[in-house]
Each structure stands twice: as structure tokens, then as C-alpha cells.
Amino acid sequence: MAISIAMLAGYILFPVLIILLFSKVKWTQKIGTVMMAYAVGIIIALTGILPTGTEPGAEQLASWQKLLMNITVPLAIPLMLFNSDFKLWTKSLPKTMAVLLGGIFSVLVALVAGYFVFRNQDVPQFEKVAAMMTGIYTGGTMNFNSLGLALDVDPSLIVLTLTFEEIVTFPFILFIVAGGYKLFRKLMPYPDAASAEETTTPEMHLEDDSFENYKGMFKRGTFGKMMLGLLLSVLFLAIGAGLSLLLTHKLNELVVILTITTLSIIASFSQKVRDLPKTFELGMFFILIFSVAVSSQFNIYAINRSTLTIMWYILFVMLISIVLHIIICRIFKVNGDLFTVGHISLLCSPPFVPPIVEALGNRKVLLSGIVIGLVGYAIGNYLGVAIAAILGAI
């Protein structure tokens, strides 16, 4: 029982420590807070200190883990969407939209094709794995986690899938930062079509620390407004739960998640809501709690021939989606830099865009990359649910 209580406190304390480390130590910013949180959880699981099975305190710990997972993601979704200016969709140039739509199309084709290639390998809940990968490759970890929760995916499978995704995706990011973007410039040597509108839009902050800047969260003027965002998030969670009870007569995570996502997008069109400070960072804090909690349930014995297939599936999706996206971008004469930030934004989410732009040395594509990622945030959950339903029916 004492270990269970200590671990419950750890689920909150570890994210705080991760944020402090991320803010103070520069090299950790290249790893990312979510990756660090999953690493902490997996290390805890591998130590064997957590009670499991019929051991004393195991049942209590499992119930607390489930409670944290069921609350943190629904609270995080609105907080991370509130600051998003979705009116930027209408201000994007045609080539930005070509990158966005071409990227989503490429990912969906690769995911579905890969499903049929690998579906006979006895992968557990494979259509749900495809749905989670749809979420992460069109919106990022937030969508991945929310789909895992909404579709009732086994926690161990969630951790395995994300672990394999990091194994496949991280080398690609290193390749880009180390100069791989030059290859895409050669493949797509078209003129830069960026306009002044893309680089000077006043409604969005474009500093390199626009995302996950945790400084000043507890300042008097900032903290109160941030708490208003939290209250609004709690309200949306209550509405989602109420609608779920009304429609299904029980708490259905899928109904709750989709309701919260829809309400959050609507709320983001309000200037007052968009101006609430540090809501993205507060949402990330809840995502980190979820990440530590779910990854601490990692079971190394779950890795076998069938689950390793997930890694090959992700690698297949990565390679096919890149090739298809390059072909589409060549057809629309998109330049290599815009392709690079667009694909990275879809695969890894908007927080990864500024470091990639820094490596490119081309600030003109920053806003386009962020817009593409924000659209992914908004539609990732819907696409993931649709993919799960379609593949499940097949």
C-alpha cells in the first residue's frame, strides 16, 4: 500500500522534474518531454518495484493508474487546443494546403496499405494500432494517447507502439537535422513561394520557444488566467461525460473524447480563449502524467514476434508516406523546405517545427509548418476513430 501511495505521488512529481530538466538543460529539449516521461515510466516498470497481479496494493495502484489515465488526457485536449488559431487555415497559401492534404493522404494510404500487408501476423488489436498511428502521424502524441484511451487499447500495447514509433521516427529527425533536408531540396528544387502574409501574421507568436515554454506559469497575472483555461477544460469534460451518459447510458471514452475535441476547436475561435496564457504547457503537464502512468505498466514479456511486427509496420508507414508525399509535392511544385517542415509537423506535431526551421535556416516556412500541425491536432482523433471503424469492419 505504501508503494502504491508513493507511486501515485510519483506520477505527479516525475512530470514536474521532467519539466524542470527540460527548462534548465538544453540537450534535453532535443529529446522532448514526452519521450523522457515514457522513458521514466519504462524504467520504473523494469525495476519491478510496482506491485502486480495478486501482490498487496496491486489492485489499488491499478485503479489509480486507470483514474489518472481517464482524467489527464480529456483535460489536456482542450488546454492544448485553446491557443490554436484555426482561422490560419484560411490564410495559408495553396502550396501549404497541398503539403497538408498531400501529407494526410500519404499517411492514410500508407497506414491502410500496411495494415493489409501485416494483418496476418497475429498483432493484437491491430486495427486500433493503426488508429493510434493515424493519430500520432497526423497530430502527435496528444492524439495518440487520446485514441488509445478512447478505443480502450491495452496499456502495454500503447507503450509498445509508442516505443517502436520513437525507434523508427527519431533517426529520421536526426537525419533531417544533420543535413538530410538537402536531399529534399534536390528532389524538390522549386522556388520559395512564401509570401509576406506567411511570415508576418500578427495573430500567432513565432518565437522559437512558442511551444513548451514553461517559464512564468506561476506569475500572478498568468496563473489565474491559466486556471480559467483549466476550469473551461473541466467544463468540457463534464459536458462530454453528460452527453455520453445521455447517449450510451454509461461513460463512453470515445464519445467523451470526440465531444471535448469538438468543443475545444469551437472555443479556440474566441480571441479571449486564445489569449489565455500557458494553457498549452498546462495541457502538456497532464500529458506527461498520463505518459508516466501508462508507460509504468510496460511489460517486457509482451515483446514477441507478433508485437515486433508493429515496428516493421511503422517503418513501412514511414517510408511509404514519405515517398508518396514527395511525389505529390513534386506534382504541385512544392519546395523542399516546405515539404520538410510539413512532413515533420504531421509526424511529430508543431513543437518539433521550430528546431527543424532552425536547422533549415529558413524562417519563411515556420508558420506553414505550425498551421499544418495545428490542423493535424484538430482532425487526428476523428481520422483515428474512422480508421479503427473501417479496418475493424473489414
Image (tube, grey):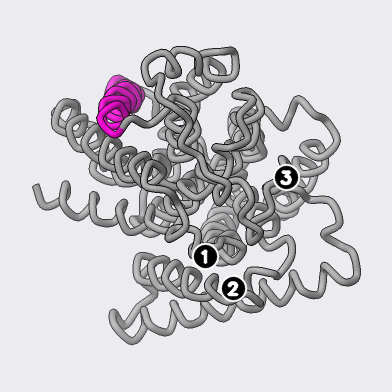
Instruction: Tell me if residue 345 comes above or below residue 12 in the rendering.
Output: above
> Local crowd at mark 2 within 10 Å, few (<14), some, or many (≥20)?
many
Instruction: Give the percent coordinates (x, y) of residue 260.
Output: 46, 71
In front of the other: 299 or 245: 245
How far across and how far down the image is residue 1, in percent?
69, 54
Give, as a three-letter code, the residue at label 1.
Answer: Pro
User: Regarding mark 1 in the picture, which secondary structure is present there?
Assistant: helix
Q: Quickly name the residue at label 2.
A: 233
Q: In the rendered structure, which segment of residues is drawn in magenta?
A: 305-332
Does the magenta run of residues contain 318? Answer: yes
Q: Where residue 353 sits in the image (x, y, percent)? A: 58, 37
> Residue 74 bears which disc, if any?
1
For discs 3 and 2, the disc positioned in front in the rendered view: 3
Secondary structure of the residue carrying numbered label 2: helix
> Is 10 part of what is drawn in magenta?
no
Instruction: Specify the amino acid type for callout 2.
Output: Ser
Q: CA distance from mark 3 to mark 2?
A: 26 Å
Give the quadrant of residue 137: top left
Residue at figure coordinates x 63%, y 23% from the top left: 359
Q: Name which of mark 3 and mark 2 comes first in the sequence.
A: 3
Whether residue 309 appears in this view of the structure is no
